[in-house]
Image: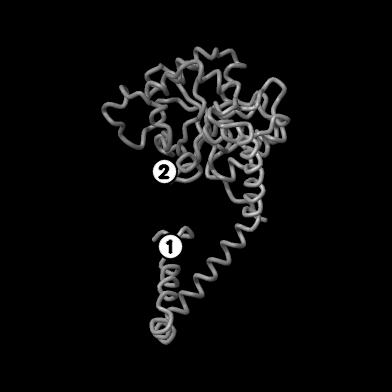
């Protein structure tokens, strides 16, 4: 298989800031904004993490056009930097790898914070650089403590509160995997959902130092029933997930067939006379633009 060419040269190049020309004008009040102050403080505390993206050097002037990183460039100018690490784009378009990427996931952010701490940056200094409370940095630093590798791998590309990690570590490994699998499948990685799963976790699936979560106003019998219902729900969810792709394909094919069917005037006339309710439902299916029936 032919390998697709990269849109930029993977090796970073240090370029003098004087040779980098911005491709757009920055707003007048940018230097006073909270975002700019955070980026500037972050660069001052831990250096530039994400390199600038520039075009190839102009053959006549030797100057580069900045494609991505205008705020970082301005902050580095104010901090007195002489040069910056850059990625050189291999085409002349302003569309760069950074324009459509997903922002850092929670796990990636955890690794970046841990790497900074390992290099000697204190959590207090990071908190000051990012303009957050030091407790947030500590929670993100300890995000994966007590989380089994399988559960952590499923969370790699997800965005979730650091408090979710604190809830998951109260469970044993197999239960962590079950809960993370359910949360990711349901696209619900909220603290409240994690707490509900913890409350429905039997005592033998919790770590030794954790006690079964008690909910005010819920008896032990009701809790046991909720645990059983949660187990049944997980099994049904897995079964639905297994057949989801095929079901969607069948629905798309059925909708296409009904569209052609209702294009036939004779069919529409017959249904109008004999089965108007059926005709109405079929028309609703055809007019729906998504699988949830919304137009």
Q: CA distance from mark 2 to mark 1?
A: 34 Å
Residue ID at (43%, 62%): 289
Label of residue 26 in the image = none
Q: Residue furthest left?
A: 28
Label 1 CA crowd tier, 10 Å (few <14, some 14–19, many 20+): few
Answer left or right for 132 relative to 179: left
Q: Quadrant of the N terminus?
A: bottom right
Give the x, y percent position of residue 142: 60, 21
Give the x, y percent position of residue 70: 39, 31
Q: Secondary structure at mark 2?
A: loop
Quarter of the figure with residue 146: top right
In this rendering, is residue 122 above or below 190? above
Coloring applied to the structure:
one colour
Residue ID at (53%, 31%): 191
- Residue 159 appears in the figure: no
Label of residue 94 in the image = 2
Give the x, y percent position of residue 250: 58, 67
Quarter of the figure with residue 213: top right
Residue ID at (47%, 79%): 261
In this rendering, is residue 109 above or below 47? below
- For disc 1, the marked residue is 289
Answer left or right for 275 relative to 158: left
């Amino acid at each position: 298989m032919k390998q697709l060419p990269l849109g930029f040269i993977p090796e970073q190049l240090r370029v003098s800031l004087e040779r980098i020309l911005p491709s757009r004008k920055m707003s007048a009040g940018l230097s006073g904004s909270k975002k700019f102050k955070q980026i500037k403080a972050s660069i001052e505390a831990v250096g530039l993490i994400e390199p600038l993206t520039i075009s190839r050097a102009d053959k006549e002037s030797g100057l580069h056009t900045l494609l991505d990183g205008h705020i970082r460039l301005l902050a580095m100018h104010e901090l007195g930097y002489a040069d910056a690490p850059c990625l050189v784009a291999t085409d002349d378009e302003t569309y760069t790898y950074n324009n459509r990427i997903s922002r850092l996931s929670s796990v990636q952010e955890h690794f970046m914070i841990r790497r900074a701490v390992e290099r000697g940056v204190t959590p207090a200094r990071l908190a000051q650089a990012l303009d957050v409370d030091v407790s947030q940095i500590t929670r993100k630093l300890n995000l994966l403590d007590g989380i089994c590798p399988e559960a952590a791998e499923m969370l790699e590309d997800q965005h979730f509160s650091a408090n979710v990690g604190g809830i998951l570590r109260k469970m044993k490994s197999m239960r962590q995997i079950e809960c993370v699998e359910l949360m990711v499948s349901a696209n619900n990685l909220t603290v409240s959902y994690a707490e509900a799963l913890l409350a429905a976790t039997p005592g033998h699936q919790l770590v030794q130092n954790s006690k079964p979560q008690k909910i005010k106003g819920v008896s032990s019998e009701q809790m046991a029933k909720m645990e059983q219902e949660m187990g049944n729900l997980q099994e049904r969810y897995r079964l639905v997930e297994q057949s989801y792709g095929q079901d969607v394909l069948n629905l798309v094919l059925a909708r296409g067939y009904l569209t052609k069917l209702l294009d036939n005037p004779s069919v529409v006339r017959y249904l109008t006379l004999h089965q108007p309710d059926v005709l109405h439902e079929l028309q609703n299916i055809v007019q729906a633009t998504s699988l949830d029936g919304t137009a």
